[in-house]
Image (tube, grey):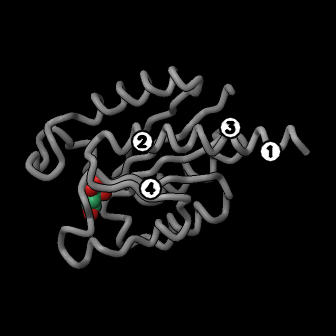
Amino acid sequence: MSETLLILNGPNLNLLGTRQPEVYGRETLADIEGSCKQVASGFGVTVDFRQSNHEGELVDWIHQARGTAGGIIINPGAYSHTSVAILDALLAVEIPAIEVHLSNIHQREEFRHHSYISKAAKGVICGFGSLGYILAIQALTAELRAAQQQKMAN
Ligand code: DQA
C-alpha cells in the first residue's frame, strides 16, 4: 500500500510544547510529526503533516487532498467547535477521516463537548495525548487495507 495520509492541525497547535503543557503535554508539533512519520513508514504509508491557524487554508488543503490522499487525520483545534466550513469540506471530498484531540474534550468546558467535525469522521480519538495521532494512523491504514481488499474481491 503506497498511500499518503494527510495530517492536519488547526489553530494554536503550532504552540505545542509551551501551550498549557498541563493540558496538552510537553511534546512539540515537530516531535509529533516525527513520531507520525516513523510509525507511518512502518505501516507502508507516507504522511503529509501540516498546521494552519487559518480556517480557509485548512479547507483548501482538504479540497486538494482529493486524488492525492487516501485518508485524513485532523486535529481541528478550536475549529472543531465552530467550523461548519471544515465539516462541509470533509463531507465534500469523501476521503475517510479520523478526528483527533490531544485532550479529552468531554472532560473540559461545556463548549468543547460538541464537535462539528465528528459528523464527517469515521472515528474520534481524544484524551490520549500525541498517542492519539499514532492510533489514528493505525486505524486509518487498517481501514484503507480493508477497502482495498474489498475492491480486489469484487
Ligand atoms: C484540542 C481541543 C480543542 O478544544 C482546543 O481548542 C485545541 C486543542 C485538543 O487537541 O485537545 O486547540 O483540539
Image-quarter location of ligand 1: bottom left
The residue depicted at 43 percent of the width and 39 percent of the height is 50
Residue at figure coordinates x 8%, y 49% from the top left = 22
Q: Amino acid at mark 2?
A: Leu
Q: Is mark 1 within 8 Å of ligand 1?
A: no
Of labels 2 and 1, earlier in sequence is: 2
Work out whether 107 lies above or below 3. below
Residue 105 on image: x %, y %:
26, 65
User: Which residue position is annotated with label 2?
Assistant: 135
Quadrant in the picture for residue 112: bottom left
Q: Is residue 4 above or below residue 71?
A: above
- Residue 145 numbered mark, or none: 3
Q: Earlier in the sequence, mark 1 or mark 3?
A: 3
Figure quadrant of the N terminus:
top right
Which residue does the image show at 62% across and 52% down from the upper left?
96
Looking at the rendered structure, the kind of residue marked 3 is Arg
| 126 in relation to 19, above or below | below
Label 2 close to label 3 by CB (< 8 Å): no
Q: Are marks 2 and 1 in contact (CB under 8 Å)?
A: no
User: What is the crowding at mark 2: few (fewer than 14 residues within 10 Å), some, or many (at least 20)?
Assistant: some
In the picture, measured across the screen, residue 145 lies left or right of residue 55, that is right
Mark positioned earlier in the residue sequence (4 or 3) = 4
Q: Could you give the CA–CA distance between mark 2 and mark 1, rounded to whole angstroms?
A: 23 Å
* Location of residue 95 in the rendering, given as x and y in whole percent from the top left corner: 65, 52
Q: Is residue 110 left or right of residue 9?
A: left
What residue would you read off at disc 1?
150
Q: Label 4 sits on what residue type?
A: Glu
**Within the image, what quadrant is residue 106 found in?**
bottom left
Q: Which residue is mark 4?
A: 99
Observer-side mark, 1 or 4, equals: 1
Mark nearer the viewer, 2 or 4: 2
